[in-house]
Amino acid sequence: MRRSVRVVRWLLASLITLAACGAVARAAVEETWMTVTLDGRKIGHMLNQREAGADRIVTTQAMNLSIERAGIVVALEVSETHEETPTGKPLAFRTHSRMSGVESTSEGTVDADGTIRVTNSVGGLSQNKTVTWPKGALFSEGLRLEAIGRGLKPGTRYESLAFQALNLEAFPLTTTIKPAEYVDVPGGRRELFRVERELKLPGLPLTSTDWIDKDYHVRKVTMSQLGLKLEVLACDKACALAPNQPGDALQQALVAAPRSLRRDDLERPLRYRLGARERAAQLSFPPTGEQKVERRGNDYVVTVSPQPRAGAEPPPVAADSQPNAWLQSGAAEIVQLAKQASPGDKQPAARMRELEAFVFGYIDKKSLSVGYASALETAKSRQGDCTEHALLLAALGRAHGIPTRITTGLAFVESFGNAERVFVPHAWVQAWINGRWQSFDAALGRFDTGHIALGVGDGDPWRFFSGVTTLGNLRVDAIEPATAATAQ
């Protein structure tokens, strides 16, 4: 039920790109330690390493964080290594992610013809795939060399194409050089160049402000998401490894409801009037079969219906029915569990309702301590929050031949922790039923009109960026009953 950890994971991947642009090594091997804070509280550290050989440059960035969710501390580790030629030509990469004991890895080799051979491993199950290196895309060394070539003259502005190994795609990265200014950093006040960057992810343009010295060493990076300020500061090893002070990042993503919603309210169409807490914040509400979206000035009117509309969204593609690294619907354990959960011949709607009820009961340890587990890991552990419920349900549906996808957004609850009448970050499943996408919620036991969708994905945590800018910046100004005709 908690998107905050996933958002931080995406920010870490982005920081690897953004911070790498300005690291210049003075020796064959160089290490830079950095401390990481969230709204002023130390939550972890980052280590940047660059090793320069005669024919290969190896750049590694590793980040360790502790994030608190409703009083439960979740440990995160993310690392990424790039291997390139001295001229910045990509050769290979490795990524590693560990969250509360759940691991995922990716290893890729870039052939001379631009073919990338990749092996992904999630929950002990490995999969191989082949993709093509995007023309003009750069890794760490390539970005570093371009930064040096462009220089630090104020007013310089240029665009690069930054490859993200964690999701095997490249995205435009805009860099703007601002005048030098005096900045307080560990070790004292220094004159540093201000560099503004924007990584143009679909649905989530990530912006950062970096401060670098004349030798292109990054001394400070700041960025904001979920209404929180994430700051990375270069310092010595002792400073970086000092004890953490984790704060509850989830609280910032809760959205207060203007009134209670009874069960009968949630069984009927509801109209929400929504706005941004900060006027400049970007909001995103995808139209779905159950969700109709209207823009009214700076605000949005979102109408949610308990019954999906036909023709509101494109039909499924082949990938919506196939196994992937996080929805391992072809694994023997998932296939067997799907047969156990819903045996015999059934119509897709009845099948999904049966699977929804099964997953609700099967995950018998409802826990926030699991950061992000795949369907196969959840089938074995039988624990997790809404994310684990959604991934397992989607995989079981695909094992029965039903196209499924994961929806992330907000769901209304009467209480959460010390908060009353709030919308909490949530995940559920959409399945292709009778020519339309219909929602099922295994974590709450059913889908109702207290759900507001912010994005749709395929279960891969690195694709949950759609709609993330809305979290932490959203307010719900009014909730009204809507007629069935209005919902259509």
Image (cartoon, helix red, strand yellow):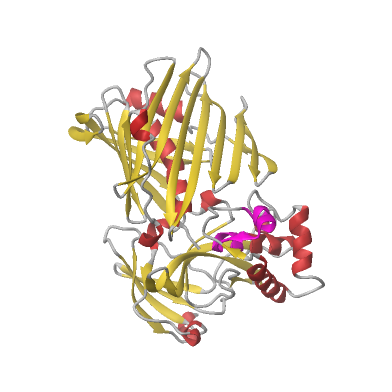
Residue 214, magenta (yes or no): no
The percent position of residue 304, horizontal first and vertical second, equals 47, 76
Front in this rendered view, residue 371 or 113: 371
Task: Tell me residue 341's x, y (percent).
Answer: 74, 68
Q: Find residue 176 and report its horizontal and vertical position in percent.
A: 29, 37
Foreground residue among 9 and 397: 9
Q: Is the magenta stretch mostly helix, strand or loop?
A: helix
Residue 86, x across and y down, in percent = 48, 18
Residue 168 seen in the figure: no
Q: Which residue lies furthest to the right in this view?
A: 344
| Residue 459 relative to residue 395: left or right | left
Furthest-top residue in this view: 54
212 or 179, which is in the foreground? 212
Kindly indicate the quadrant of the structure image that contains residue 386: bottom right
Residue 217 position (above or below residue 320): above
Looking at the image, which residue sits at the far front? 243
Side of 306 where 193 appears, left or right: left
Seen from the viewer's position, the closer of residues 310 and 23 is 23
On the rendered structure, is 47 left or right of 352? Answer: left
Q: What residue is shown at x 51% (from left), y 29% (from top)?
A: 82
- Asked if 478 appears above or below 135 in the picture, the reply is below
- Asked if residue 423 can be seen in this view, the reply is yes
Q: Give the range drawn in magenta.
A: 374-391
For the image, the number of numbered tags is: 0
User: Which image quadrant is residue 351 in?
Assistant: bottom right
Indicate whether 62 appears above or below 407. Answer: above
